[in-house]
Amino acid sequence: MLKRHLLWLPLMAWVGLAHADNAEMREKLKEIMPNVTVESIEPVANTGLYEVIIKGEIVYFSEDMQYVFQGDVIELQSRENITENKRVSLRKNALNALNEADMVVYEPKKTDYNLTVFTDIDCGYCRKLHNQMAEYNALGIRIRYLAFPRAGIDSEAFEKAEAVWCSTDRQQAMTDAKNGRDVHSEDCKSPVQAQYELGRRLGVTGTPSLFLDSGEMLPGYVPPARLKKLLDSKAAS
């Protein structure tokens, strides 16, 4: 999360450039926050607000750069949540950029839907989902696992995830680990930490967290038949 005491106060104290274009705003933000990477700056329709992405987080600045806030922007007439739409878009782009060689993938005979799941080895509902993997696959749902050890880096959960991802047979190692069996593997340069940090950036706070290819997140376990019905409904709409 952004450290607000480092970000807000200098900005609130500074009277900025009226009607600044994106390049001017980017340069001024660079002066104020030299150690922060601004990923994008875009105007929000005709609101006078500018949407700024910093470390995957969405913040808004007034055009004169005197005010900044975090929160959802909703267009009242249409009830469209502009901020959530952007979050979904950012998630979609982040997921599309991933390398499946760094995942644990369970393939159905015929794929109708692709689901990316942040999982923790010891999470009860993660284990329940995994034990129903054959049912998901039979319904045409392809599961791609990413690691999200809920206890964080340098925890036992993190070590268990690394043991799975460093195994020569990740699928079997995942099944063994989720059934409480020890997994022994050689040390390797695993993607576990990067996946954990990506999960936090995408808003994952618990596991399992399910992501559709659209970038929409389903924060929790969904039984196979209900998930298939949900995915069918979304595809139809």
Image (spheres, rainbow, N blue to C red):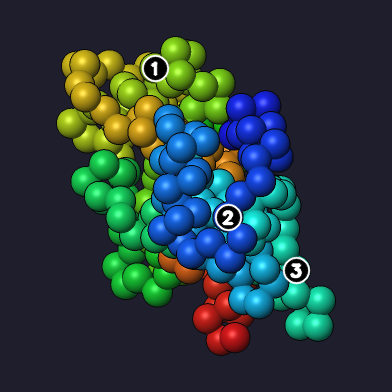
Q: Earlier in the sequence, mark 3 or mark 1?
A: 3
Residue 3 vs residue 129, the one in the foreground: 3
Q: Residues within 10 Å of mark 1 (few under 14, many from 20)?
A: some
Q: Where is mark 3, residue-wise?
A: 74
Q: Residue at x 27, y 36 (%)?
A: 170
- Give the mark toward the camera: 3 or 2: 2
Q: Is residue 133 left or right of residue 165?
A: right
Q: Earlier in the sequence, mark 3 or mark 2?
A: 2
Q: Quadrant of residue 35?
A: top left
Residue 17 position within the rendered picture, expressed as x and y whole percent measured from the top left: 58, 55
Q: Tell me how many marks there are.
A: 3
Do the residues bearing badges 3 and 2 touch, measured as CB atoms within 8 Å? no
- Give the mark toward the camera: 3 or 1: 3
Label 1, secondary structure: give it.
helix
Identify the mark at residue 17; answer none if there is no mark.
2
The quadrant in which the C terminus is found is bottom right
Residue 141 position within the rendered picture, expressed as x and y whole percent measured from the top left: 43, 64
- Give the mark toward the camera: 2 or 1: 2
Identify the mark at residue 159; answer none if there is no mark.
1
Cα gap from disc 3 to disc 2, whole angstroms = 26 Å
The residue at the far bottom in this view is 236
Residue 10 vs 76, above or below: the answer is above
The residue at the far right in this view is 76
Residue 95 vs residue 73, the one in the foreground: 73
Q: Residue at x 65, y 57 (%)?
A: 64
The amino acid beneath tag 3 is Ile
The amino acid beneath tag 2 is Leu
Residue 113 position within the rendered picture, expressed as x and y whole percent measured from the top left: 42, 69
